Amino acid sequence: MSLPIPDKNTFYALAGLAALGLLASIISSLIPLWKILLVLTLIILFLDWVLSKLLYKKDSSEDRKQTIEIKRDLQGSLPLGIARFIKLRVFNHSKSPKTLSLFDHFPSQVEGEGLPVELSIPAEQYADVQYKITANQRGNLIFPGTQIKLRSPFGFWRNNHFLPVLSETHVYPNFAAISNYALLATDNNLSQIGIIKKRRRGEGQDFHQLREYREGDALRQIDWKATSRVQKLISREYQDERDQEIIFMLDCGHRMLAKDDELSHFDHTLNALLLLSYVALRQGDAVGLATFAGDSRWIAPRKGQHTVQDILNGVYDLQPSTESPDYSKAATELLIRHKKRALVIILTNLRDEDSDDLLTAIKLLKKRHLVLVANLKEKSIEEMLDEPIDKLQDAISNSAAQYYLQQRQKTFEKLVANGVQTMDVSPDKLTVELINAYLGIKRSGAL
């Protein structure tokens, strides 16, 4: 169904008639002229509307298709929070040029820029339209169709048409960071994003190869038997251990709903998890995932770069719940599911009341695994301490924030005292700190 909408030319014509009518009320001799122009204007408006309807039906019946056809070029997957462009190709199948305005109906989980668009398309030609979107929520997105407003032959009306152009895509955690990491790794510029690689040349845990001695090699690297055979210094070169396993325990509880910027703590965590998975897989390790405090999902540790896609497909529609985390239950389920020793990374948002349950869970896990607790802290709490204290309410808020941070610190001191490796970082720094912690563990040989 199409509805006629007055164009700006219609308002100009009516405004001119109103001005002439006002003048005619003063100069009575202009009244007959005003009446004639009024009738002519109404007739032209009516004819223009009828002609636009008839031409649209005629063009559609002759071509056996809609006068205007639209095809949308939409990627099958989009990264969360990263701008992407959508391309529309607009075909004019009629034998006359068309002028129209276009608006693509994108879902509410998306922010769009660059719409509506005004187009003039020659007869039997097409035009390309591009606009930018940024997805702010993970999951499935459906684009139902496109709204067009065709200008009538005399330009007094716009005929409104909704064209069903159904498209579907998936919004994943920010996989665009993987490409950036891979590019920087290729150029040995990882320090630009804060990744620290401290290993000296040739050092590691697993034997890699024999090679000629180079200045800077440690004496313990020299292979004396090989040296005596070839009569020159030969060094052993090592690499970090491979074929180890990394398992993420992802908290899907209500505290992960917290937001310090455009993304929730949960979305920041998924982005960090995804990039560290890519790094670990490149190191030759296997990566797995277990979720708790909500939707319980399990991806067994696997090697190979295809595992990144498996993790993406496993978590792209995962949302934090309203439940509280039960660390002991999650640890017990993991021990039942997985027997081989692994680095277990618990990604969560702790409170002081969680310390006893978390310690119990960690003691269970440490019987078989190496455990790292990566905790997200709220930047808003620290920002509260920087606020000026001008009145009683400000002092109360500042004292509450101080007390909260003290209790939080006690919780971490208790974890450290029990030999637990911990991180306490803001969401925007989680990715870099997590990768550095993983590389540090690899270098230490603790796993």
Image: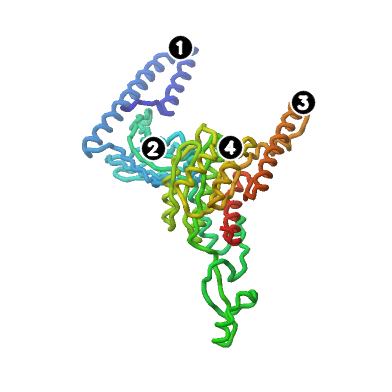
Tell me which residue sits at (25%, 32%) in the image.
57
Q: Which of these two is toward me, 258 or 86?
A: 258
Nearer the observer, 416 or 28: 416
Callout 1 touching callout 4 (CB < 8 Å)? no
According to the picture, the residue beneath numbered tag 4 turns out to be 259
Determine contact: label 2, label 4, CB under 8 Å: no
Q: Residues within 10 Å of mark 1 (few under 14, many from 20)?
A: few
Mark 2 belongs to which amino acid?
Answer: Ile
3D distance between C-alphas at marks 2 and 1: 61 Å
Of mark 2 and mark 4, the one earlier in the sequence is 2
Task: Tell me, yes or no, if residue 292 can be seen here.
Answer: yes
**Residue 235 left/right relative to 93:** right
Question: Mark 3 belongs to which amino acid?
Answer: Leu
- Residue 171 appearing in the image: no
Left or right side of 330 for 143: left
Marks 1 and 3, the one that precedes in the sequence = 1
Measured along the vertical axis of the image, is residue 123 above or below residue 399? below
Q: Residue 392 bears which disc, if any?
A: 3
Residue 7 circle label: none
Tag 1 residue:
28
> Label 2: which residue?
142
